[in-house]
Image (tube, grey):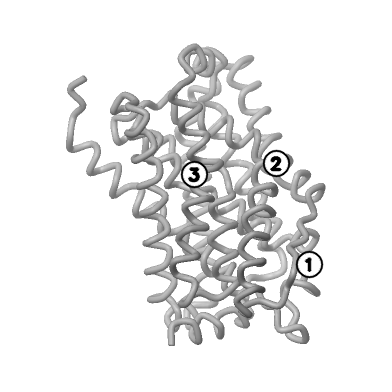
């Protein structure tokens, strides 16, 4: 029953508008520029003097979360469709989310660690994101082909195009933001907070704007996607907290790593999905071949809204309990 519903979801053509991908790319770049205004060389230096926490966090982000996601897909495989599963892998392959630094601060976590993780994972995203999606996506498709679930034998990823897209959207704004913070520190400090609030609000409105023209589809399928993203997101938070606790990191660091691993930059995933040079319509959205990626879009888009709700909820819980150490 559930798999049949999700199968029909794959073939849904969302009404997103012709310029949605470009607008989302611009908004995401502005968000990353705003985040970079708060990144200083001294902050990064202090974190890397004692690198245990950031190395643990990045390994959980780059290896732990994709691995846990793959295991979760295997467990839920009888209920999932290939495109929904690939959507989960795509989200897990993205770098840390663009509001994790605010949440880390609100939760009384280690803000410097959070900012450093965001910066490093974002800068390395042009390599790590396509690599993880290719690796875990192909592992899943091989399993799906053996079980008769999927007919695509191999996942071809345009690494060069993804690298170019991710670097322009994430890498360039991060570099420009850090240069601005370095050469114009007073200006950067003055505009940092309002710029971040404005850009994140615009992004949130954009995601909602994608839902409004397609509200009927989301009403029909939201219960399945909601539960799936809820479970996936909880596993992401759990991966961060369990890994940081296992390494016996300070409690402030555990909070920040938990949030960083649980808050994914799903906006980047949406931008990639809407880029016809990366996910070519004749391959990924072709009724003739029966390969439609509606499930990937639904999962990625709902992540963009849900992780804000869950992240703020978790941050509020953390905030209620002061750290004694």
Say whether marks 1 and 3 touch (CB < 8 Å). Answer: no
The residue under label 3 is 64
Q: Does label 1 or label 3 sit earlier along the sequence?
A: 3
| Residue 42 drawn at (x, y percent) | 52, 12
**101 or 59, which lies in front?**
59
Q: In terms of secondary structure, where does tag 3 sit?
A: helix
**59 or 172, which lies in front?**
59
Q: Which mark, residue 126?
A: 2
In this figure, what is the number of numbered marks?
A: 3
Q: Is residue 126 above or below residue 68?
A: above
Q: Residues within 10 Å of mark 2 (few under 14, many from 20)?
A: many
| Residue 231 drawn at (x, y percent) | 37, 61
Residue 178 horizontal side relative to residue 49, left or right:
right
The residue at the point 47 percent across, 50 percent down is 201
The residue at the point 34 percent across, 32 percent down is 254
Q: Does label 2 or label 1 sit earlier along the sequence?
A: 2
Kindly report which numbered mark, 1 or 3, lies closer to the viewer in this rendering: 3
Q: In terms of secondary structure, where does tag 2 sit?
A: helix
Q: Assign the C terminus to one quadrant of the image.
A: top left
Q: Is residue 281 above or below residue 279?
A: below
| Residue 228 drawn at (x, y percent) | 42, 67
Inter-mark Cα distance, 1 to 3: 29 Å
Q: Does label 2 or label 3 sit earlier along the sequence?
A: 3
The residue under label 1 is 280
The residue at the point 80 percent across, 60 percent down is 277
Q: Residue 184: which quarter of the image?
A: top right
Q: In terms of secondary structure, where does tag 1 sit?
A: loop
């Amino acid at each position: 029953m559930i798999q049949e519903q999700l199968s029909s979801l794959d073939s849904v053509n969302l009404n997103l508008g012709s310029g949605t991908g470009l607008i989302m790319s611009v908004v995401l770049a502005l968000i990353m520029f705003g985040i970079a205004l708060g990144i200083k060389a001294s902050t990064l230096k202090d974190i890397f003097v004692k690198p245990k926490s950031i190395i643990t966090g990045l390994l959980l982000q780059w290896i732990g979360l994709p691995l846990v996601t793959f295991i979760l897909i295997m467990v839920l495989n009888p209920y999932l469709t290939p495109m929904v599963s690939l959507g989960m892998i795509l989200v897990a392959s993205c770098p840390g989310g663009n509001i994790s630094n605010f949440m880390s601060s609100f939760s009384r976590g280690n803000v410097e660690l959070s900012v450093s993780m965001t910066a490093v994972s974002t800068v390395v995203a042009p390599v790590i994101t396509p690599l993880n999606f290719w690796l875990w996506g192909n592992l899943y498709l091989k399993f799906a082909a053996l079980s008769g679930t999927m007919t695509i034998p191999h996942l071809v990823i345009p690494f060069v195009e993804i690298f170019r897209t991710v670097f322009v959207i994430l890498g360039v704004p991060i570099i420009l933001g850090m240069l601005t913070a370095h050469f114009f520190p007073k200006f950067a400090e003055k505009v940092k907070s309002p710029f971040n609030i404005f850009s994140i609000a615009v992004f949130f409105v954009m995601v909602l704007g994608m839902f409004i023209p397609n509200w009927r589809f989301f009403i029909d399928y939201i219960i399945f996607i909601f539960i799936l993203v809820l479970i996936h997101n909880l596993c992401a938070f759990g991966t961060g907290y369990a890994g940081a606790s296992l390494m016996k990191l300070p409690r402030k660091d555990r909070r920040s790593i938990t949030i960083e691993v649980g808050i994914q930059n799903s906006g980047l995933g949406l931008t990639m999905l809407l880029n016809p040079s990366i996910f070519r319509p004749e391959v990924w959205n072709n009724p003739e071949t029966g390969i439609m990626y509606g499930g990937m879009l639904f999962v990625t888009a709902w992540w963009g809204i849900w992780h804000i709700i869950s992240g703020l909820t978790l941050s509020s819980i953390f905030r209620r309990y002061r750290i004694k150490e």
